[in-house]
Image (cartoon, grey):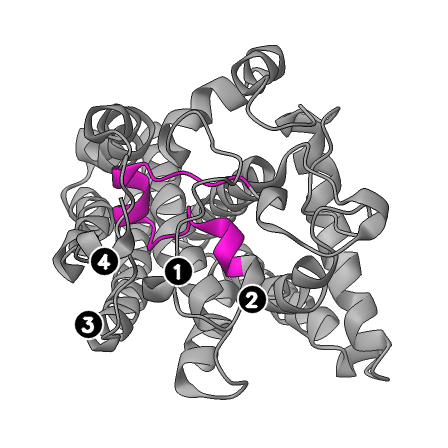
Amino acid sequence: MSDAALAPEPWTVHLLGLISPILAISGNLMGGFYTLAGVLFIWVVSPILDILFGESKDPRPPRESGTPFETLLWVHGTLHFVMLASFVYFASGEGITKWLLAASLSTGLVAAASAIVTAHELGHKRPRSPGWRLARALLFSINYTHFTTEHNHNHHKNVATDKDPASATYEQGIWSFWLTTIPGQFLSSVSVHNRKGRTGLKNPSWRGLFLQLLAIGILVSLHMSGSAWAAPVLIGWLVVSGIAILTLEYVNYIRHWGLRREDNGRFEEGHAWNTEARWSRWSLLELTRHSDHHLHASVPFWKLRPYPNAPSLPSGYYACWWPCLIPPLWRRMMRGRAPSI
């Protein structure tokens, strides 16, 4: 069916992505078992919704008006900081308990979407614009300040090649990928700035790491001076950041796993995995239309187009999570879904 025969979906479907931060905020404020709300929604309910909502057999064309989508990005960013504030409130009163871990996991999982997915989109804005600055603040809040540099200046340039630490090879399982991609991307971002003559603390990647360590050091100092709330807040913040980063890199893993350009040739639609799974598309701001994002990096998410002939994941991002954690099962599920795999 041609685009002309279909109308774009209403922008309101993307409001579904606000469910998870609202649940996490509510859980942090209510405490106890309710702190598991984000975990249960993202790790249990959302994979089921991915399957129940299914994929669009006739993909809808992109939208033209961007006003509601621009607003939505700022709503996500604002809710993220409200969520962090609710987490600090909970952690400072809870102490180091099992519910602190639950709240940290919930907040971190939601931050992977409301903070990192939002920052990913805003990171393509003009440098030092309000949206770009919001992206920087979001990334600092989960201790991944170098992401925009690495994503824009290395990943987009070298995706699906060995020069890109965010492009997993066929042989890599998710566990080994996590161990290599996180330090690899940081060092790559350092190199980007070094090539521009920005070394030492003039290098934004080193400066960002220094500011993160400074914030951690302040919390350690407060704990040592007798502030009972500092330790649970610090431990919780590190867990929040860790789970958000691991979730982001899981997404990087499944978006390019096993796909390689021949002789480092031109990027084509077949060098990224896509999916038209409705729940993942709606709640993750069209992150799943990944080929078009690499072919047209400056195009905002609401204008991304589907590529029916691109390699397709077996399901949405949420439903792929659990199989991906078992590399032999993941390889079996993915076999035959791309010419080279």
Residue 98: image quadrant is top left
Q: Callout 3: helix, strand or loop? A: helix
Mark 1 or 2: the one toward you: 1
The boundaries of the magenta stretch are: 273-293
Give the residue type at disc 1: Leu
Q: Is residue 198 left or right of residue 114?
A: right
Disc 3 designates what residue?
68
Mark 1 or 4: the one toward you: 4
The answer to whether residue 143 shows anywhere in this view is no
The answer to whether residue 248 shows anywhere in this view is yes
Q: Give the Cα separation between the discs numbered 1 and 4.
A: 16 Å
Mark 4 or 2: the one toward you: 4
Q: Earlier in the sequence, mark 1 or mark 4?
A: 4
Mark 3 or 1: the one toward you: 1
Q: Earlier in the sequence, mark 1 or mark 2?
A: 2
Q: Residue at x 68, y 37 (%)?
A: 259
Disc 4 designates what residue?
4
Image position, residue 136 (x, y; %): 50, 73
Image position, residue 102 (x, y; %): 33, 33
Q: Callout 1: helix, strand or loop? A: loop
Residue 94: image quadrant is top left
Disc 2 designates what residue?
215
Q: Residue at x 50, y 71 (%)?
A: 123
Image position, residue 20 (x, y; %): 23, 45
Residue 117: image quadrant is bottom left
Give the residue type at disc 3: Pro
Count neighbours of disc 1 (C-alpha within 10 A) and say few if under 14, some if 14 to 19, many if 20 or more: many
Q: Earlier in the sequence, mark 3 or mark 1?
A: 3
Mark 4 or 3: the one toward you: 4
